[in-house]
Every structure is written in C-alpha cells, then in structure tokens.
Image (spheres, rainbow, N blue to C red):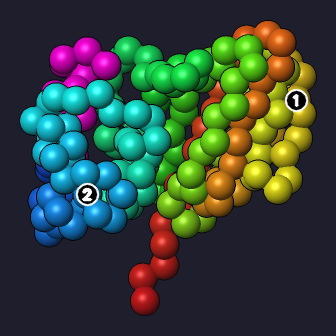
Amino acid sequence: MDKLSLGTLGQHLQTLRQAQGWSLSQLAAAAGIAKSNLSRLEQGNGNPTLDTIWRLAVQLKVPFGTLVAPIAVPLGEDGVEVRLLDQGKDHPQIDAYWMRCAPHTLRLAEPHTPGARESLILISGTLEAGPEDNTRTLSAGETLTFAADRPHLYRTGEAWATLLLSIIYHEEPTP
C-alpha cells in the first residue's frame, strides 16, 4: 500500500475508533492485533494485510469500503488483489469490488458484519467460492450469492480468476 493510501486508512481508522469511544487498546484487542500495529496504522505507517483491515472493519461495524475509500490502488497479498469500485450510501449499504486471484490461490475470509451477504460474478477463470461448508465451483459468467457473516473462501484452479463482488451490509436491529 502506498503512503497516501496508508494515510487515508489511518485517518479513517482513528476517526471511526474515536467516534465509537474505543481506545487503541480496546480496538486492537477486539480485532486480535497488537496495539503497536494499530497505532502505526493510525499514523499512516505499517503494512496491513487484507485480513487485518477486514477484522478492524468488522469490529468498528463498518463496511470494508469505509476504511479504504477513496484508495484507488489495488490492495493485495498472497495472490489476491482487491479494488473498491464504488460504495453505495443507501440502506442497506452495498460496496462493489473488483477482485483478481492468482492460480492455485486459497483465500480464507473471516465473517463480515452480521447479516452481510456477498454476490459475485466470475468474469474469467474458474473459482470455488462460498461458505466454507457449502462452496460452489463457478465458470466465467456464472454468479453466486451467499451469507458472508460466516467464514467463507475463494479458491482458484490453474488460471487467474477475475470477479466482480458486491457486499450487502444489513444493519443490525437495535435492541
């Protein structure tokens, strides 16, 4: 991630954390990361993984896109690149992503916020995707929608896979 993108992520993290009244220690513990790593991220430093950003978004109860908008460069690691295309502001909020996975890649995704659903359209390649206990293999042009508030995965075969992915964030009912 470039310096400008890291700075943007850091500003979003700090603003959201403070708005929710969380200390650095509280958010770091809830997200399962070191307080020093969170502090560096808020200062626009570090090298966060996609998993780290997702865990922070889940703990802050915001869509992934809220942390990374308007970062225009692809975020990636271990053969996976993700780029936020657009972030809807209606209710429920829907984020749209472009994602590209290298051959022989397994991406294990942690649960998103409660009620979240993913819909994907495979553009090229083949891809196994869905909840860990109920995956489906897709070919180019096929679609899949599944509950994303439980562990799920993306697994490629012999070739690169490119897909469009939308995440629908349903708001939790207030007690």
Considering the numbered disc 1 on the image, is that residue within a helix, a strand or a loop? strand
Is any atom of residue 113 visible in this view? yes
- Is 37 or 92 nearer to us in this picture? 37
Considering the numbered disc 2 on the image, is that residue within a helix, a strand or a loop? helix
Magenta stretch encompasses residue 158 = no
- Residues at marks 2 and 1, CA–CA distance in whole angstroms: 36 Å
- Is disc 2 surrounded by few (<14), some (14 to 19) or many (20+) residues within 10 Å? many
x then y, percent, for residue 154: 71, 35
Question: What residue is rendered at 48% in x and 78% in y?
Answer: 173
Q: Which residues are magenta?
A: 1-13
- Is 151 or 90 nearer to us in this picture? 151
Question: What residue is rendered at 85% in x and 53% in y?
Answer: 134
Q: Tell me which numbered mark, 2 or 1, is placed earlier along the sequence.
A: 2
Q: For the residues labelled 2 and 1, say whether their Cβ atoms are less than 8 Å apart.
A: no
x then y, percent, for residue 29: 29, 63
Magenta stretch encompasses residue 9 = yes
Location of mark 2 (residue): 28
Dot in front, 2 or 1: 2
State the mark number for residue 138: 1
